[in-house]
Amino acid sequence: MTSPAADPASEERTSRPAAPGAASRRISGAVWAALGIVYVVWGSTYLGIRIVVETMPPFLSAGFRFVVAGLLLAGLIAWRQGPAALRVSRAQLGSAALVGLLLLLGGNGLVVLAETSIPSGLAALLVAVVPAWVVVLKAVFGQRPTIGGVAGVLLGLAGLAVLTLPGLSGDVRLGGVLLVVVGTLLWSVGSFSSSRLPMPANAFTASAYEMVAGGLGCAALGLIRGEQHGLDLAAFSARSWTALAYLIVFGSLIAFTAYAWLLQTAPISLVATYAYVNPVVAVLLGALVLNESVTWPIAIGGAVVVAGVWLIVSTERRS
């Protein structure tokens, strides 16, 4: 699951404020290359998840993915910056664990479960409504939204209604759709809370702890659901293993690193454009690779959601 910069969170981590004056810096070829990675890789994670759950249990596979990615990231931090970079206070560790559980167990975990019953492209379009929830949360806590933000929320919710109402989006299971909607709410709460909790100062360190905590939470829930019963590793297809490896290396490490670098290098308005590019990439890949049908209601509802995201991203300012 990915989330727009407007909400301040990425798929695997909570984003930190961009460096002052970033908007005035020259946009280099490296910036465009990193942005292209974020566009394509994060847009493709929905396809990867869908392929993983073809033969693998949803929560156990997600738990494995995030724990491995978190440990790899921690190892890279210790190697590049020294073990001291991983030191955090109890409060910081607790905050990172809580955010990780909200983002990766509640948010991403429910999307993984939902993709056992709904197309990956539809899941991506439903997830795109996350910034609308964040604007609502900000308003609840006293931050007055802009006119464009309000309009974006209304557009996003209208698109969500088209995608969610039974019968409008074609032959999809309503239960899977509702799982994604709940997941977006939990992801939004985690994103919103992260800037108000005592998080580790090093964004990469925070992300490593978030991924390990979220992964352990996913694994625990998988065991509670009984996903380990009758588990046969030989039954896991080669393409599911390949997709899982892709999600760990590209979705959780390479794209994350590119995004973190972009936040410190590129104008936030440019970085935020991935919010409405990812769903388009996801829908196209789902149709091309998995032959997922794109009905007119899904196309119209998705376009409305993306338009709402564009309004929010282009008018809201992160607090």
Image: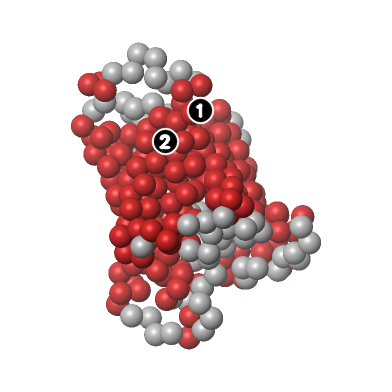
**Residue shown at 58% from the left, 50% from the top:** 90
Percent of width and height locating residue 264 = 45, 73
Q: Is residue 303 above or below residue 179?
A: below
Label 2 with label 1: CB-CB less than 8 Å = yes
- Earlier in the chain: of badge 2 and badge 1, it is 2
Label 1 crowd bin: few (<14), some (14–19), many (20+), radius 10 Å:
some
Give the vertical position of 174 relative to 273 (above or below): above
> Image check: 29 left or right of 306?
left
Q: Residue 59, percent across and down?
A: 44, 31
Which residue is more in the foreground, 102 or 70?
A: 70
Specify the farthest residue to the front.
Answer: 84
- Determine the residue positioned at 49% across, 21% down: 225
Question: Is any atom of residue 96 visible in this view?
Answer: yes
Q: Residue 40 appears in which quarter of the rendering?
A: bottom left
What residue is drawn where x is 70% and y is 54%?
Answer: 137
- What residue is pinned by disc 2? 63
Query: Does 199 sit above or below residue 121?
Result: below
Q: Which residue is mark 1?
A: 221
Horizontal and vertical percent position of residue 111? 48, 38
Tell me where residue 131 appears, x and y as whole percent: 59, 56
Toward which corner of the image does residue 317 lie, by quadrant? bottom right
Check disc 1 and give the amino acid type: Leu
**In the foreground, 20 or 296:** 20
Residue at position x 27%, y 42% from top? Answer: 245
- Label of residue 76 in the image: none
